Amino acid sequence: MNFHILTLFPEMVESALMTSITGRAAAEGKISIRAVNIRDFSNDRHKKVDDYPYGGGAGMLMQAQPVFDAYESVMAGIPDISRKRVIYVTPQGRPFTQSMAEELAENEHLILLCGHYEGVDERVLEEIVTDNISIGDYVLTGGELAAMVIVDAVARLVPNVLHNGDSAHTESFHGNLLEYPQYSRPEEWRGRHVPDVLLSGNQREIDRWRRREAEARTAERRPDLYERYLALQACEEFLLKDKLHHMDMIELIRRGRARLLARQGEEILLEDTESHMLFHTMPGADRKEHAENSVCNRPGILCAAHRICLHQEAFVPLLAGMGYRQEAVCLQSVCTRKEQLPIRGLYGADGQPVNGLSVRFDGVCATAFLDGEEAGSVRLQRDGSIGELEVLPQYRRRRVASALETCLCNQLIQKGMTPYGRIPEENEAALALQESLGLHIARGRVYVMS
């Protein structure tokens, strides 16, 4: 990922961001950080970039020309097809949040404009800026500190920037909970002791303690977050009444990726904060008036959604009328086991690979090899489901598909997740595979719209 910071003080930005985790990631080529000096683009011989505002008033205003030319110099090196955002850091912008950081991390280029003096000429802001973002309701002397906050928060979400891949998903604000208390050696310090449960070695009890502490801390310090957390917990409790049919929505909540867009009685609309796919359900809805009174009809609620997973057919015509097309009709397969699945046909009694078959997992994709040649793969989809299972024709009927899906299921089980996938209802072979592995097939259908 590439960060371009338009600033009057490039040394300030570089000295801070080229240290610690962001500096290491930049040195390793996982991100790039470039500070662009706006003064270099001034037409004034003294490199002046500010002037008095029209209409009078205190202070000076950054001029449009040097800002625009600095921006143009950056854009000249970015392909048109690249995903990019131009951010102006300002107290007048949207409050910066973790979910916003996750959204920005999906782009290839972020251009951040740091204002100074009394701000920037409005005309250039209208010309180039896609997002106005604030890090809080206070005023700084310049935008550099705010820009560095955004870069740091976004950079750590880029794959492999954090050495521990799970760190970004187990800390404050994940799932609307603040992080639980943490302790290190020694066991006793100034009369204060590490809680006994953390020394017990019982991981299940440790996890329960951490959840309770996170809940208590959030309720005390951030009641606004705790209210959102309770709302999602209530949704999960309701969805569990038909667990297999709603496992995609349940896992979204449990993995801390759900945002509740709307709830109206038994109707629930969730957004996946990582893939931005929407998930909708209203059990028992089978009449036209259900769709007409749906939360989906609220103005603007679906405007940013490219894909929606519906759990009742009654809402398909409603979405079709909004311009969505039906992509697939699926059944959900769910692995309800808590212990790992046996990998049949992949390892012998001695634990060594047999028949020349091996599977490698890179965190997203499991790839099978037979005698050193790639035979097939399966992926963890952006929405958290298992999908894109494919075995090359010459390697079929050799248990490759079984080994692939079992390995990916076990990776998720090891992390305390419930593996699930969506299988097109006409794909009888895939459905048979799920049942042979011991997965359960939901009775209700899901309708993927795009």
Image (cartoon, rainbow, N blue to C red):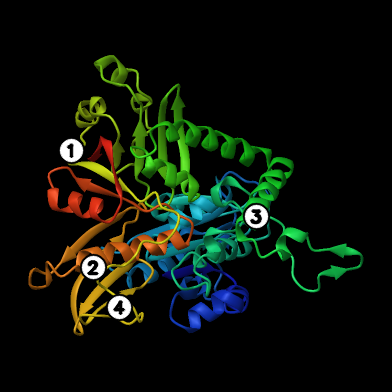
**Residue wearing tag 4:** 348
* Residue 31 can be seen, yes or no: yes
Residue placed furthest toward the front: 349
**Residue wearing tag 1:** 325
Q: Secondary structure at mark 2?
A: strand
In this rendered view, identify the residue nearer to me: 251 or 45: 251
Residue count near mark 1 (Cα–Cα under 10 Å), binned few <14, some 14–19, many ≥20 = some
Residue count near mark 3 (Cα–Cα under 10 Å), binned few <14, some 14–19, many ≥20 = few
Left or right, 351 with respect to 315, comes to right
Label 2 to label 4, Cα distance in Å?
A: 21 Å
Label 4 to label 1, Cα distance in Å?
A: 47 Å
Left or right, 333 with respect to 233, comes to left
The amino acid type, in three-letter code, at marker 4 is: Gly
Which is more N-terminal, label 4 or label 2? 4
Q: Foreground mark, 3 or 2?
A: 3
The amino acid type, in three-letter code, at marker 1 is: Arg
Quadrant in which the N terminus appears: bottom left
Reply above or below: 137 against 117.
above
Q: Secondary structure at mark 3?
A: helix
Q: Foreground mark, 4 or 3?
A: 4
Q: Foreground mark, 2 or 4?
A: 4
Which residue sits at x=44%, y=57%? 104
**Residue wearing tag 2:** 377
Label 3 to label 2, Cα distance in Å?
A: 36 Å
Q: Foreground mark, 1 or 3?
A: 3
Residue 379: percent from the left, percent from the top?
A: 29, 62
Left or right, 53 with respect to 372, comes to right
The amino acid type, in three-letter code, at marker 2 is: Ser
Residue 133: percent from the left, percent from the top?
A: 53, 51
